[in-house]
Amino acid sequence: MSSTNYELRETPLEQPERRLLYFTCPACGSCRLQEIANGLWSISEINAVKANGEIEYGACEIDGGNKRTFRCGKCGYEIEGDDQNYIEDGQSLADWLITQSAKT
């Protein structure tokens, strides 16, 4: 009688909080999602300045932002919550995306 060894591997439990959510614009159908942040500041390393005034940048650090909104990158549709206010945080955006995916 031949014997075969099988390696048992456990499949990790699905982690719903790590599931990727995808955007589809309800106005135009595009999948391009943009974040608009006001009040940002950035610090960039400058690698070179050319005689024509063109600047070549290196590493960039971005921080701050006191207001965020999310919109379609194609048509500009701005995402609003149930209260008709613009969504301004990641958790509210995730909730909106989950709600939208349930509608399709």
Image: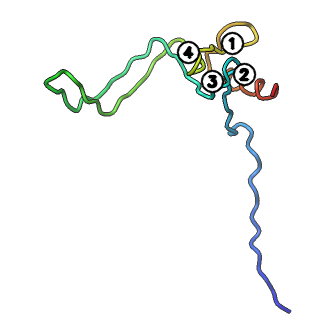
Q: Which mark is residue 68?
A: 4
- Are there few (<14), some (14-19), or many (20+) residues within 10 Å of tag 3? few
Image position of 86 with respect to 63: above or below? above
Q: Amino acid at mark 3?
A: Gly
Please identify, in this view, whether the residue under mark 1 or under mark 3 is nearer the observer: 1
Mark 2 vs mark 1, CA separation in Å:
8 Å
Contact between marks 3 and 4 (CB within 8 A): the answer is no
Frontmost of labels 4 and 1 is: 1
In the rendered image, residue 5, in percent from the top left (x then y), is placed at: 77, 80
Colour style of the rendered protein structure: rainbow
In the shown orientation, is residue 104 left or right of residue 40? right
Q: Position of residue 48 (x, y in %)?
A: 20, 31
- Which residue shows up at 68% across the image and 7% down it? 85
Q: Residue at x 50, y 16 (%)?
A: 37
Q: Which residue is mark 1?
A: 80
How far is mark 2 from mark 3, CA to CA?
10 Å
